[in-house]
Amino acid sequence: MKTVNPNFVVGIGGSAGALTAYKAFFEELPATTGMAFVVIFQMNPAADSQLASVLSRHTKMPVIVPTTGMPIRKNHVYVIPSNADLCIDRDTFKVISPCTNKGNVVDLFLVSLAEALGPRAIAIILSGHGHDGTAGCKRIKAMGGTTFTQDRSAEVAGMAASAQASGNVDFVLPEGKIPAELQRLARSAKPGGPHPGAFETNAPQQNQLIAAFPAAVKDRLLPELELVALPVGKALYDSGEILRDVYFPTTSLISLLYVMGNGQSSELAVVGNDGLIGVALFMGGESTSSTAVVQIAGYAYRLSGQRLKDEFNLHGAMMLSLLRYTQALITQMTQTAACNLHHSIDQRLCRCLLLRLDRLPSARVIMTQEMLSYILGVRREGVTEAAGRLLKLGVIEYVRGQITVLDRSTLEKLSCECYAVVKTESDRLVAIHHEL
C-alpha cells in the first residue's frame, strides 16, 4: 500500500561515541514524520547488539531489526543486524550475513540507498572513527539526496570530519537539532505539487509531456521506457554529437549549454519534468550545437530516438504535443538570450531560480555558486553578491550548495519580465492541449 511508503529514508551512520548521539537524536524526533530511519552502527561482528532495545526507550516509533525482503515502512526505525551488511533493494531490505564489509558498512548501505531512492535518500553521519560514510554521502549527493553530519559535539570526530572534508555535506548540526531540519525539508515540498511520499521513481507520468500523451500512445510507449539515474555532471550529449535517445526527466534537471572555444559557457534553456531532451531527433536535425548536462541529479526515462520518430511520424496528437513543447523551448531560449544581454545579474539569477522551481518537485534547488556562475556566464563574485542580496531580503536560504526559496512571490517581483514571458507562453501552450 502506498500509504505506508516513507517520503524519505534516512540512513544514520556511527560507531564509537555514537550511542549518546543516537539517543539525543531520537528523543527530539516526532513519531509521525512520514520518514523511515535506518541505524547503521559499526560494531564488533561477534557482539550481540542490544541497540534496538536501547533505542526503543528513546522513541515512540517501532524499532525493528530488518530481515531480507522486509518492506520499508514510514514512521519506523530499523537497526542493522549484528555481524551483517545491510542494503536496500528497491523498497525492501537485503541482509548479507556474515558481514563482509567490516569498516565500510555505512558506505555500503548509503550507496544502496542512493541508488534505490535518489532524491528521497538522506544520510546522517554521527560520532565515530575513520571515514566510513564519506563515499556514501558523495553518492547520495550525486543522486540528488541530502546529507547531514554531527558538528563538533561529536565525541569522536573522525567519520563526520571526513564527510565534511569531502565537500558532500549539506548541514553540519548538533545531533539534537538535526530532527527539526529534517521536518523542514519534508515541509519544503512545492505547494500544490506532489508530496514526497507520492514521489515514485517508477511513475513516467511525473513527466508532464508523457502525462499529456494520448492513452493509446502511452499504451505503446510506456513498456519501452527505461528508467535511468542521472548523476550531476553527466553529459547526455555534446555539441555536434548524433543523438541516439531521448530523455524525459522526472526528478532530474538538465541544462542546455553553449560552450565557447575558450571554455566559457552560457545556459540556453533548462529542462526538467516539463519536457524532454532530444528535440533535434524528431525535428530532423539529428544533432545540435548545444550540450546537455545534468545539473541536478535524479531520474529520467530514456526512449530510443528511432521509436520516438516512428511515433512522431504517425502525425497524430503526440506530434502536436511535441511541437508545442518545442515552441515553448524556443521561447525560453530566445528570452534567455535577450535577458543575458539587457538585464542585471540579480534579475537573471531570479529568473534562473524560478525556471528551476517550475521544473522540480520541491522548493529546494541544489546548485553551488560555481555552477550558477557557469550557467549565467558571469564571474563567481557577481553570483555571490546577487545571492547575498536575496539572502538578506529573506527571499532564499542558502546552505552549502542548497538554495531553498522562502518567498516565491517576492522572487517573481525581483525578476525581470523574461520569466513571465516564458511562463505565460508555456501555460498558453498547455491550455491549447487541454482544449483539444
Image (tube, rainbow, N blue to C red):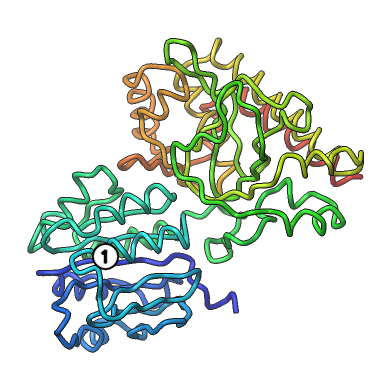
Q: Position of residue 6 (x, y in %)?
A: 48, 71
Examine the rendered structure and indicate whether residue 421 appears above or below residue 436. Answer: above
Residue at left offset 66%, top offset 26%: 332
Q: Position of residue 175 (x, y in %)?
A: 21, 63
Amino acid type, callout 1: Val
Name the residue at the left extreme: 155
Q: Position of residue 232 (x, y in %)?
A: 44, 41
Q: Position of residue 85 (x, y in %)?
A: 30, 74
Question: In the displayed structure, does residue 26 sit left or right of residue 333?
Answer: left
Res 347 seen here: yes
161 or 110, which lies in front?
110
Residue at left offset 39%, top offset 79%: 76
Examine the rendered structure and indicate whether residue 168 appears above or below residue 201. Answer: above
User: Is the C terminus in the top left, top right, bottom left or bottom right quadrant?
Assistant: top right
Which residue has dot 1 on it? Answer: 106
The answer to which quarter of the image holds residue 149 is bottom left
Res 361 seen here: no
Question: In the displayed structure, does residue 255 sit left or right of residue 10?
Answer: right
Examine the rendered structure and indicate whether residue 236 appears above or below residue 259. Answer: below
User: Is the N terminus in the top left, top right, bottom left or bottom right quadrant?
Assistant: bottom right
189 or 64, which lies in front?
64
Question: In the displayed structure, does residue 147 sit left or right of residue 411?
Answer: left
Element under disc 1: helix
225 or 250, which lies in front?
225
